[in-house]
Image: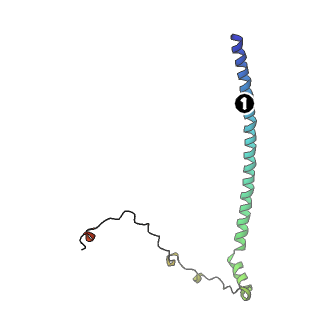
């Protein structure tokens, strides 16, 4: 009986060792994948920074003013002036839709009607 217990204990220890070995390699693979993803994210952030800088460079007011002047005959674009912009308070926002009345309340005026 004691030898059976020793054999079962040894098998359990070997099984746990195999499980730990596999988990160790899975963890290392997951860490490697995370590092690859972090490198990719860093590269994409750098690319995004470059794209934002290019966008800001291309949208310089003096460049846009010059392009509007050059292409006036073809496009009819007017130069940008500060007076052309309005304020936010001048924008008419639509009124929100009222929810349907699902539980009407009777008033005194309605009860006195003939």
Q: Of 47 and 108, which appears nearest the observer?
A: 108
At a point 72% along the width and 34% down the height, the residue shown is: 23
At a point 70% along the width and 18% down the height, the residue shown is: 9
Q: Residue furthest front?
A: 114
25 relative to 42, above or below? above
Q: Secondary structure at mark 1?
A: helix
* In this picture, residue 37 sits left or right of residue 93: right
**Which quadrant: the C terminus?**
bottom left
Count the marks: 1
**In the rendering, at what x and y percent does residue 37 appear?**
73, 50
| Quadrant in the rendering for residue 11 | top right
15 relative to 29, above or below? above
Residue under pointer 1: 20
At a point 72% along the width and 30% down the height, the residue shown is: 20
Q: Residue furthest top?
A: 1
Q: Residue furthest bottom?
A: 73
């Amino acid at each position: 009986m004691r030898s059976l217990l020793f054999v079962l204990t040894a098998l359990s220890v070997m099984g746990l060792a195999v499980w730990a070995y596999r988990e160790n390699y899975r963890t290392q693979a997951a860490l490697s994948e995370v590092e690859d993803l972090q490198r990719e994210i860093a590269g994409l952030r750098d690319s995004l920074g470059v794209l934002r800088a290019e966008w800001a460079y291309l949208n310089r007011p003096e460049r846009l003013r010059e392009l509007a002047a050059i292409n006036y005959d073809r496009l009819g674009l007017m130069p940008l002036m500060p007076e052309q912009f309005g304020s936010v308070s001048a924008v008419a926002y639509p009124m929100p839709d009222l929810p349907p009345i699902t539980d009407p309340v009777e008033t005194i005026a309605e009860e006195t009607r003939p």
